[in-house]
Amino acid sequence: QVHLVESGGGSVQAGGSLRLSCAASGFSYNGYIRNCLGWFRQAPGGLREGVAGINSDGSTSYADSVKGRFTISQNNAKNTLYLQMNSLKPEDTAMYYCATGWSGSASDCYTMAVNIWGQGTQVTVSS
């Protein structure tokens, strides 16, 4: 059973940086069934949206709103996922969730069909 546990959230001022981590115990890529890891976020009163994804082949993908500011990566053992967030904006304020699932295209992992969610970590950006 895969368990995802996020950490690293907090409060920062606009323009600052945070690095989120996700410990993915029991995780392994599995063909097309589980070919993606990624991050989603949900702002207060908003819908949960994909932020960044990484495919089993190492390909990464990002929502347009975070391109050039956020970077997704994972360690060599593929049991820890990271999201480096730079140049943060107040509109980045949200609960951030680690997730794994599948996508038909390596370039679309940030919009993967999720089969396992983490509990989330709060990110708050003030102006």
Image (tube, rainbow, N blue to C red):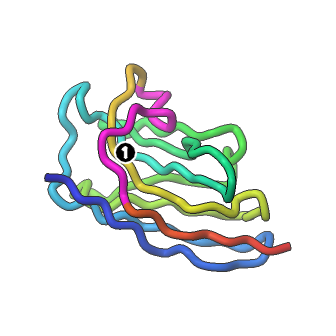
Residue 44 appears in which quarter of the rendering? Answer: bottom right
Point 79% across, 74% down: residue: 126
Q: Residues within 10 Å of mark 1 (few under 14, many from 20)?
A: many
Residue 124 appears in which quarter of the rendering? Answer: bottom right
Residue 33 appears in which quarter of the rendering? Answer: top left
Point 30% across, 65% down: residue: 23
Q: Residue furthest front?
A: 45
Relative to 123, residue 42 above or below: above
**Residue 68 percent location from the top left of the image:** 69, 48
Q: Is residue 88 left or right of residue 76?
A: right
Which residue is at the front of the view, 20 or 2?
Answer: 2
**Residue 5 percent location from the top left of the image:** 33, 66
Q: Is residue 10 left or right of residue 110?
A: right
Point 74% across, 64% down: residue: 87
Q: Residue furthest top?
A: 104
The verdict on residue 125 being magenta is no
Relative to 112, residue 120 above or below: below
Q: Is residue 32 left or right of residue 68?
A: left
Image quarter (top left, top right, bottom left or bottom right) of the C terminus: bottom right
**Residue 104 percent location from the top left of the image:** 38, 20
The verdict on residue 112 being magenta is yes
User: Residue under circle 1?
Assistant: 37
Which residue is at the front of the view, 59 or 122?
Answer: 122
- As helix, strand or loop, the secondary structure at mark 1 comes to strand
**Residue 108 percent location from the top left of the image:** 49, 28
Instruction: Specify start and end residues of the magenta stretch as a single range.
Output: 106-118
**Badge count:** 1
Disc 1 marks a residue whose amino acid type is: Leu
Point 26% across, 35% down: residue: 34
